[in-house]
Image: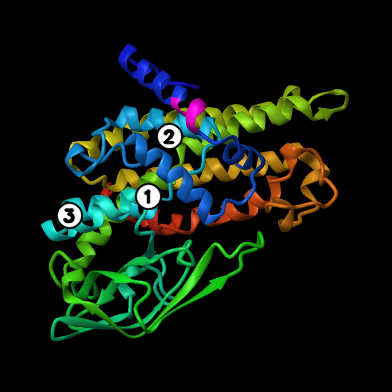
């Protein structure tokens, strides 16, 4: 499925592959292959290994500690990471906040926060969604009232991914209630250890407390933690979301998932023959592969725009929609492929130290958990319905 790359790009691929073979702990790779849950310590260990090599934020400019990778190099790196079953780089600091600070942050904020993202001092989470403001972020109600050299923050955020691990959160807060809703939002950096913050986990259908509710009760935040200008946060939020939606396309994850699906279909039998030889099933796999190849090409174009300093526009919404559809189809086909092994689901079987009876072959274990968990892909980062509205306005002028 690889696209055509130059000799220099293929040399870079070999370099990445050799690094992963030498430095990726087998324990972490095995967790990836078996779909087991990763702990905070697992993520931190892998981030530290990548940072030592200078590859945690390879696409950042060199002046901020990155490698200045091209869009193609970033694509190759992510492709090799998923091929090796390496843990995903947690995106909130590296892929979301980092580009915002580099573009809109003060020199003091860049100097202080960017190194802490790389060295693991800060674990960031995202405070965007609220109970009444999911895809419609302009409706955020969490308030920040200026009081001298502080803001006093009150309100609630929800669906805060990995917030139970974070010590920092970047938030959209309302600093003005007059005029258009978008014109009264600011972008604030908040220390999660500040008095008045409560984190409450939400257990998802796969049995994991991956997301959280975060409550703010008279939380005092230094005014120096405001990114950019007051009431201009909507601009910064949109910039971040275009990067997030491009990332949600998950080309590397889809490629790895498709190869895993094919390997299962070669092992599982259908009327005495490998399932992959079933014409109907093979046709569905072929359609996914065609869609994935087209999306990978488009993804490279959008990443190239981002690398040249442009924030991706409606193209990122197109990638978000297509990427989530492809990954969900791969998840659904994987459950079909493992057959009856997809029926029992014991979330504890994906944790360290599980000593229960095997639930089918190893390759079947994560099929149902992954299917359940990835139903969220078409909702978070702005639901696919919202993305279609963005496309219709930005491209079709409707």
Label 1 or label 2, whichever lies nearer to me, is 2
Indicate the position of residue 151 as horizontal and vertical percent values. Answer: 21, 81
Give the camera-side residue of 361 and 390: 361
**Residue 11, image quadrant:** top left
Label 3 element class: helix
What kind of secondary structure does the magenta stretch mostly adopt? helix
Q: Which residue is identified by label 1?
A: 245
**Residue 306, image quadrant:** top left
Q: Which mark, by number, is residue 78?
A: 2
User: How far apart are the two marked residues, 2 and 3, measured between alpha carbons?
Assistant: 27 Å
User: How far apart are the two marked residues, 3 and 1, measured between alpha carbons?
Assistant: 27 Å
Q: Which residue is identified by label 3?
A: 111
Q: Is residue 297 left or right of residue 161?
A: left
Q: Mark 2 and mark 3 in contact? Answer it, CB < 8 Å.
A: no
Give the camera-side residue of 372 and 10: 10
Say which quadrant the C terminus sits in: bottom left
Q: Residue furthest top?
A: 7
**Residue 132, image quadrant:** bottom left
Looking at marks 2 and 3 on the same chain, the residue that comes earlier in the sequence is marked by 2
Can residue 230 be seen from the camera position used here?
A: yes
Indicate the position of residue 174 as horizontal and vertical percent values. Answer: 25, 78
- Residues shaded magenta: 19-23
Label 2 or label 3, whichever lies nearer to me, is 3
User: How far apart are the two marked residues, 1 and 2, measured between alpha carbons?
Assistant: 16 Å
Q: Residue at x 43, y 29 (%)?
A: 294
Give the camera-side residue of 40 and 128: 40
Q: Mark 1, residues whose alpha carbon is within 10 Å: few (<14), some, or many (≥20)?
A: many
Q: Is residue 20 magenta?
A: yes
Q: Residue at x 17, y 75 (%)?
A: 223
């Amino acid at each position: 499925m690889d696209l055509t790359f130059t000799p220099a790009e293929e040399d870079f691929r070999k370099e990445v592959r050799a690094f992963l073979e030498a430095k990726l702990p087998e324990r972490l790779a095995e967790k990836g292959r078996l779909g087991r849950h990763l702990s905070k310590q697992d993520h931190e260990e892998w981030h530290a290994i990548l940072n030592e090599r200078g590859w945690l934020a390879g696409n950042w400019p060199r002046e901020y500690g990155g490698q200045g990778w091209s869009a193609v190099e970033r694509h190759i790196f992510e492709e090799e990471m998923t091929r090796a079953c390496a843990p995903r780089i947690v995106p909130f600091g590296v892929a979301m906040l980092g580009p915002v600070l580099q573009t809109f942050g003060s020199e003091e904020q860049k100097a202080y926060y960017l190194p802490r993202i790389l060295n693991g001092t800060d674990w960031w989470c995202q405070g965007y969604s609220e109970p009444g403001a999911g895809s419609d972020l302009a409706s955020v109600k969490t308030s920040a009232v200026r009081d001298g050299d502080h803001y006093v923050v009150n309100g609630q955020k929800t669906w805060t991914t990995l917030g139970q691990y974070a010590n920092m959160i970047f938030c959209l807060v309302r600093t003005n209630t007059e005029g258009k809703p978008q014109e009264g939002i600011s972008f604030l950096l908040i220390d999660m250890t500040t008095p008045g913050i409560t984190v409450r986990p939400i257990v998802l259908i796969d049995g994991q407390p991956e997301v959280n509710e975060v409550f703010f009760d008279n939380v005092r935040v230094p005014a120096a933690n405001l990114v950019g200008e007051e009431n201009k946060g909507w601009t910064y939020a949109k910039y971040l979301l275009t990067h997030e939606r491009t990332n949600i396309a998950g080309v590397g994850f889809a490629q790895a998932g498709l190869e895993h699906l094919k390997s299962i279909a070669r092992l599982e039998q259908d009327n005495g023959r490998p399932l992959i030889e079933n014409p109907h099933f093979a046709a569905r796999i072929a359609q996914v592969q065609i869609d994935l190849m087209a999306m990978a090409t488009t993804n490279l174009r959008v990443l190239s725009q981002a690398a040249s300093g442009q924030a991706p526009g409606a193209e990122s919404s197109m990638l978000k929609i297509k990427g989530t559809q492809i990954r969900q189809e791969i998840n659904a086909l994987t459950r079909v492929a493992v057959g009856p092994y997809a029926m029992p689901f014991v979330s504890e079987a994906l944790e360290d130290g599980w000593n229960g009876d095997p639930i089918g072959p190893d390759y079947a274990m994560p099929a149902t958990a992954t299917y359940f968990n990835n139903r969220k892909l078409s909702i978070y980062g702005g639901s696919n319905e919202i993305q279609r509205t963005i496309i219709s306005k930005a491209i079709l002028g409707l």
